[in-house]
Image: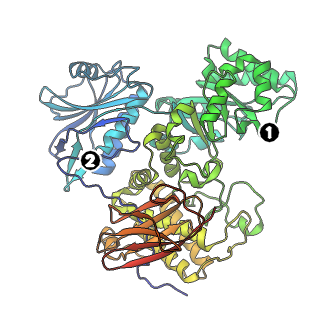
C-alpha cells in the first residue's frame, strides 16, 4: 500500500501565534518573576544605527552575552549590530543595548542610579538580571543589568524575546520592566566523557536551558580520573567559565586500600589547582561501596577545607539504593562517623518533596538536597534504542548515531520523573526543596528540547506550563513559521509509538503492529509532509549543520523506518509551495486523545479546522450525564482532563464519551478511565 499525496487527517497543533496590539502582551520563557508592561514599544528601522555596548572592563561572560545577542539578532532579523565598549565613540548610534554589571560597566551604573534601578550583587540576586528602557542624551537605551555576569547572559536572552519583526525590515522592541532570578540555584547536566561536553555548541545548548553548571568526568561513576585529557580538561573549564558556569570535578570515592586514598586526593589537587574547577564531588553510586570508602570521604572533606573550598563546594553521591532517598542506612552511618559530611552537599535521585527536605533538616544537614535527574527515560524509539541493555541482533541494525530523533516530551511522562506533575505542588515550590539539579544524560534525546524544558522548570517552577514551554522550544528550533510542523510531527510520532507499534527493549524489528494499519499509514504520511516542510529553514535559531543533522535528517530517518515497518514504499514528500498557508488551508476539524485508556489524566488535542469555528469539548459518563466541559479560546491547542468532574471531584473508573462540537460538526471519542 502506498499512501496518496493528500494531506492526512491526523493533526495536533500547539497554537504558535501571538496577537500584538497597542497594549502588548509579552510572553517570555522562562516566565520572569516580575514583569510590568507600560504598553509602549520602539520600532527600530533599518536606517537606525544600533549598537550593543558592554563595559570597558567587561568580563568574559559579559562579552559572551553581547556576542550571543548579536548572533541571535542576526539570525532572526538579519541585522548585525556592532559590539562596542562604553569608552568608544558612540555618537552615531540611536539605539543602544547596554549590557553588563554595575561593577564592570560605568555607564550602566550611572544610568541605573539616575533612573532609580534596583540593581546590585544581592538584588535581584544570584544569576538575576533587570531589563529597563530609558532615554539619555537623545538615545534610546535598553539596560540589561546583571547581579552577576551570568545574569547578563540570561538577561540578553529575555531581551531577544522582547523583539519581533514588523513588516519586512523593522524590529519592534516591546517595553517591559523586568526583574528576574532563578528559583533553583544550580542547574545543569553532567555528561561523560569530557570530549562530549566539548562537542560543538554543546555549552551554548546549556545556555539555552539557562544551565549554569557542568562537570568533568570520564566514566558514569566518576573514576577513570587518570584518563582525562589534560588539554581537554583545561579547555572545558575555560569555556565554562567564559559562560559564567560553575564547574564540578567528579571523583570516584570507591577505594580498596588506604594507599588508594592518597592517589584520589592527588586527582582532587589536579582538578582544583591545574584544571581550575570550582568544586569536587565524590561518587559512590551504582559501583558499590569500597572497603575504605568512609576513610576516603573523611579525607576528602578535610582536603577540601584545607584547600580553601567551602562546604558547599564539596558534594557526595551515596551508593545504591541509598542515593534514592535522604533516609538511608549508609547515609546516616557516614553522617554519624564523619560529622563534617553534614555540612557538605548531598545528591539523591529521588524526586524532590517536602518530606525529603524535612528529613534532610531532621538529620541536621546544612544544605537542602541536590537532585540527580534520571530523565528522559531509556525508552525505545523508531530511530534509536537505549544505550544499555541486551541488544539483540535485530536491534543492532538500529545502533544509535548522530542521526536519530526523539520527540519533545513532558518530563512527567518519561524516566524517573514519571507521573510527577510539574504544574502543581509540590513541584511549584521546587526552589524551596533543593539546592540544585543536574540531568544525567543516560539516554538519547535532542538537547535543545530537553535542556530548554528542564531549564524552564528549574528557573521558575511556579509559572511552568509545559504547553507554553513546548511552543517556545519549537519556535526557537524551527522558527514561528515552521514550528507547527514540528508540533504535528511529534504528535503523530507519539501516537505511532503508543497506539500502533509494540516497542520495548530487544523487541523484534519490525515491531508488532498493534493498531489499524491504514490509520498508522496516514500518520506516517503526515509526518513525511511535515519533515519536508521543515527543510531549508531560514528561521531556525540553532546552527544550520546541527539543525540539518539532528532535526531534518533525524525526522526523515523516523519516517523511512515507519514506512518500512508498515510495508509502505517510501518516496520523499516535496515541501509545499507556501507551507505556512497550506497547513491551515487543508485542516479539517478534529480531536485526538492521548493516552487512552488513562490514569490519572489524558491530553486532548483539538483543532477547529480551516473554518476556525467556535467549539466546545464536553465529556459525558455512560449514563449521559455531563461530567466535564471546556470552551477553547483558540482554534488549536491542547487541554488536559485530569479525571475530575465539574466540581473538581474525582470521576469513577469507567467509560466516558468525549464530544467535540461546533455549530456544524460533531466528533466523538470514547475514553476509558482506569484506576
Which is in the foreground here, disc 2 or disc 1? 2
10 Å crowding of disc 1: few (<14), some (14-19), many (20+): some
Q: Choose top left, top right, bottom left or bottom right for residue 563.
A: bottom right
First in sequence, mark 2 or 1: give its number: 2
Considering every residue shown, the one lying at the far left of the view is 138
Vertical order, 103 against 350 (above or below): above
**Where's the C terminus, which quadrant?**
bottom right
Return the x and y of residue 398 as percentages of the image width and height.
67, 65
Q: Quadrant of residue 191?
A: top right
**Residue tagged 1:** 287
Residue 233 locus on image (x, y percent): 61, 32
On the question of residue 210 being in view, the answer is: no
10 Å crowding of disc 2: few (<14), some (14-19), many (20+): some
Colour treatment of the image: rainbow
Q: Position of residue 283 (x, y in %)?
A: 72, 32
Q: Which SS class for mark 2? A: loop
**Residue 246 as seen in the image, left or right of residue 270:** left
The mark found on residue 515 in the picture is none
> What residue is drawn where x is 41% and y is 82%?
6
Q: Position of residue 389 (x, y in %)?
A: 75, 57
Q: Which mark is residue 25?
A: 2
Q: Looking at the image, how many numbered discs can be counted on the residues?
A: 2
Horizontal placement of 11 versus 369: left or right?
Answer: left
Q: Which quadrant is the N terminus positioned in?
A: bottom right
Relative depth, front residue between 522 and 203? 522
Residue 390 higher or lower than 276, as above or below = below
Residue 410 in view in this figure: yes
Measure the alpha-carbon separation of dots 2 and 1. Answer: 52 Å
Say which of 206 and 10 sits in front: 10
Q: Is residue 584 left or right of residue 149?
A: left
Seen in the image, is 8 located left or right of residue 501?
Answer: left
Amino acid at each position: 500500500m502506498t499512501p496518496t499525496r493528500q494531506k492526512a487527517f491526523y493533526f495536533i497543533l500547539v497554537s504558535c501565534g501571538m496577537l500584538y496590539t497597542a497594549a502588548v502582551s509579552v510572553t517570555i520563557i522562562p516566565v520572569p518573576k516580575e514583569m510590568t508592561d507600560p504598553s509602549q514599544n520602539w520600532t527600530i528601522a533599518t536606517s537606525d544605527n544600533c549598537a550593543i555596548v558592554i563595559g570597558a572592563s567587561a568580563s568574559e561572560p559579559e562579552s559572551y552575552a553581547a556576542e550571543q545577542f548579536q548572533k541571535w539578532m542576526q539570525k532572526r532579523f538579519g541585522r548585525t549590530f556592532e559590539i562596542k565598549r562604553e569608552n568608544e565613540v558612540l555618537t552615531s548610534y540611536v539605539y543602544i543595548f547596554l549590557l553588563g554589571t554595575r561593577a564592570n560597566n560605568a555607564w550602566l551604573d550611572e544610568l541605573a542610579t539616575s533612573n532609580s534601578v534596583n540593581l546590585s550583587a544581592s538584588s535581584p540576586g544570584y544569576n538575576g538580571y533587570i531589563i529597563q528602557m530609558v532615554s539619555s542624551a537623545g538615545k534610546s537605551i535598553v539596560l540589561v543589568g546583571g547581579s552577576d555576569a551570568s545574569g547578563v547572559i540570561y538577561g540578553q536572552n529575555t531581551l531577544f524575546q522582547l523583539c519581533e519583526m514588523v513588516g519586512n525590515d523593522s524590529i519592534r522592541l516591546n517595553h517591559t520592566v523586568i526583574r528576574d532570578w532563578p528559583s533553583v540555584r544550580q542547574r545543569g547536566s553532567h555528561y561523560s566523557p569530557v570530549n562530549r561536553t566539548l562537542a560543538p555548541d554543546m555549552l551554548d545548548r546549556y545556555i539555552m536551558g539557562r544551565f549554569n553548571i557542568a562537570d568533568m568526568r570520564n566514566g558514569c561513576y566518576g573514576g577513570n580520573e587518570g584518563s582525562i585529557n589534560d588539554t581537554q580538561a583545561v579547555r572545558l573549564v575555560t569555556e565554562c567559565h567564559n559562560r559564567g558556569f560553575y564547574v564540578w570535578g567528579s571523583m570516584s570515592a570507591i577505594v580498596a586500600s588506604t594507599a588508594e586514598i592518597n592517589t584520589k586526593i592527588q586527582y582532587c589537587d589536579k582538578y582544583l589547582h591545574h584544571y581550575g574547577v570550582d568544586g569536587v564531588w565524590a561518587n559512590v553510586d551504582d559501583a558499590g561501596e569500597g572497603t575504605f570508602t568512609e576513610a576516603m570521604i573523611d579525607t576528602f572533606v578535610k582536603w577540601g577545607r584545607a584547600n580553601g573550598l567551602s562546604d558547599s563546594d564539596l558534594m557526595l553521591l551515596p551508593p545504591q539504593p541509598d542515593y534514592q532517598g535522604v533516609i538511608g542506612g549508609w547515609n546516616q552511618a557516614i553522617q554519624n562517623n564523619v560529622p563534617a559530611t553534614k555540612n557538605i552537599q548531598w545528591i539523591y535521585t529521588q524526586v524532590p518533596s517536602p518530606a525529603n527536605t524535612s528529613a534532610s533538616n531532621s538529620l541536621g544537614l546544612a544544605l537542602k538536597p541536590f537532585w540527580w535527574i534520571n530523565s528522559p527515560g531509556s525508552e525505545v524509539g523508531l530511530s534509536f534504542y537505549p544505550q544499555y541493555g541486551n541488544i539483540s541482533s535485530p536491534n543492532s541494525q538500529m545502533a544509535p548515531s548522530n542521526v536519530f530523533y526523539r520527540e519533545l516530551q513532558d518530563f512527567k511522562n518519561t524516566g524517573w520523573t514519571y507521573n510527577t506533575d510539574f504544574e502543581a505542588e509540590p513541584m511549584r515550590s521546587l526552589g524551596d526543596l533543593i539546592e540544585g539539579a543536574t540531568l544525567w544524560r543516560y539516554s538519547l534525546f535532542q538537547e535543545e528540547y530537553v535542556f530548554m524544558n528542564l531549564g524552564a522548570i528549574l528557573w521558575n517552577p511556579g509559572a511552568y506550563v509545559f504547553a507554553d514551554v513546548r511552543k517556545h522550544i519549537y519556535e526557537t528550533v524551527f522558527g514561528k513559521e515552521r514550528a507547527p510542523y514540528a508540533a504535528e510531527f511529534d504528535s503523530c510520532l507519539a501516537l505511532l509509538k503508543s497506539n500502533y507499534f509494540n516497542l520495548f527493549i530487544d523487541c523484534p524489528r519490525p515491531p508488532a503492529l498493534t493498531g489499524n494499519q491504514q490509520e498508522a499509514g496516514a500518520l506516517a504520511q503526515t509526518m513525511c509532509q511535515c519533515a519536508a516542510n521543515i527543510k531549508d529553514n531560514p528561521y531556525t535559531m540553532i546552527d544550520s549543520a546541527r539543525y540539518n543533522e539532528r532535526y531534518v535528517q533525524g525526522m526523515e530517518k523516523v519516517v523511512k523506518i515507519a514506512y518500512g515497518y508498515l510495508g509502505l514504499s517510501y518516496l520523499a514528500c516535496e515541501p509545499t509551495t507556501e507551507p505556512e498557508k497550506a497547513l491551515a488551508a487543508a485542516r479539517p476539524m478534529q480531536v485526538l486523545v492521548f493516552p487512552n485508556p488513562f490514569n490519572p489524566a489524558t491530553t486532548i488535542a483539538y483543532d477547529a479546522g480551516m473554518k476556525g469555528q467556535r467549539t466546545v469539548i464536553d465529556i459525558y459518563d455512560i449514563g449521559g450525564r455531563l461530567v466535564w466541559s471546556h470552551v477553547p479560546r483558540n482554534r488549536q491547542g491542547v487541554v488536559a482532563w485530569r479525571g475530575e468532574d465539574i466540581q473538581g471531584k474525582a470521576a469513577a473508573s469507567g467509560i466516558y464519551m468525549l464530544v467535540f462540537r461546533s455549530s456544524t460538526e460533531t466528533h466523538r471519542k470514547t475514553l476509558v478511565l482506569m484506576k
